[in-house]
Image (cartoon, rainbow, N blue to C red):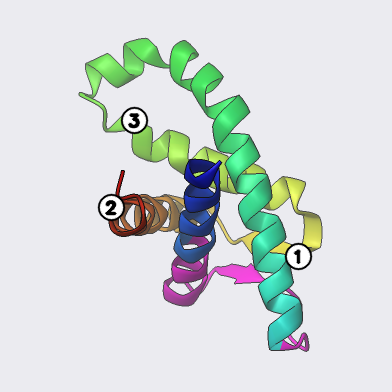
Amino acid sequence: MTTIFVKFIANAVALAAAVWLVSDITIGEPGDSTGSKAVTLLIVALIFGVVNLIVKPIVKLFALPLLILTLGLFTLVINALMLMLTGWLADDRFEVGGFFSAVLGGLIISIVSWAVNMILDRD
């Protein structure tokens, strides 16, 4: 149970970092309060976790030849697609401006999520 909570917190922190660093990735409406944006961030982190849990392994399985051919670099494209899918599922509350913003956001999310998992998961 704690591992799920740690991954959820890591996703939330990583998404917040991506929103902060990439100008084309936005969360909430421009006039929303900080509390409203925080709740939206937690909901988006939950959606992102579910997408990564269910959809990402299926996409990786079908993209296995490309993953082998590119020595795993196609994972960046898969991460970008998962971020764009999360933006589509979250509707107007979370928006990804374009594919290259999604690639940069996916890279930031991967790095920050890895770092937060390393810090919090001390098993």
Residue 76 visible from this viewpoint? yes
Q: Position of residue 119 (x, y in %)?
A: 29, 59
- Give the secondary structure at mark 3: helix
What's the residue type where badge 2 is placed? Met
Work out how far the residue at label 1 is from the one at label 2, CA to CA, in angstroms: 29 Å
Q: Is residue 1 left or right of residue 105?
A: right
**Mark 1 or mark 3, which is nearer the start of the sequence?**
3
Work out how far the residue at label 3 is from the one at label 1, CA to CA, in angstroms: 28 Å
- The magenta-colored residue range is 15-33
What's the residue type where badge 3 is placed? Phe
- Give the secondary structure at mark 1: helix
Instruction: Answer above or below: position of 60 versus 4.
Output: above
Residue 99 visible from this viewpoint? no
* Camera-nearest residue between 106 and 47: 47
Location of mark 1 (residue) = 93
Q: Which mark is residue 85?
A: none
- Let me know if residue 19 is in the magenta part: yes
Which residue: 55% across, 50% down? 5
Disc 3 packing (10 Å; few <14; some 14–19; many ≥20): some
Instruction: Answer above or below: position of 32 versus 17.
Output: below
Q: Quadrant of residue 73?
A: top left
Q: Is residue 43 left or right of residue 67?
A: right
Which residue: 62% across, 36% down? 51
Instruction: Answer above or below: position of 54 versus 121.
Output: above
Observer-side mark, 1 or 2, equals 2
| Labels in figure, total | 3
Location of mark 2 (residue) = 118
Q: Quadrant of residue 1?
A: top right
Disc 1 packing (10 Å; few <14; some 14–19; many ≥20): some
Work out how far the residue at label 2 is from the one at label 3, CA to CA, in angstroms: 24 Å
Q: Which mark is residue 74?
A: 3
- Let me know if residue 111 is in the magenta part: no
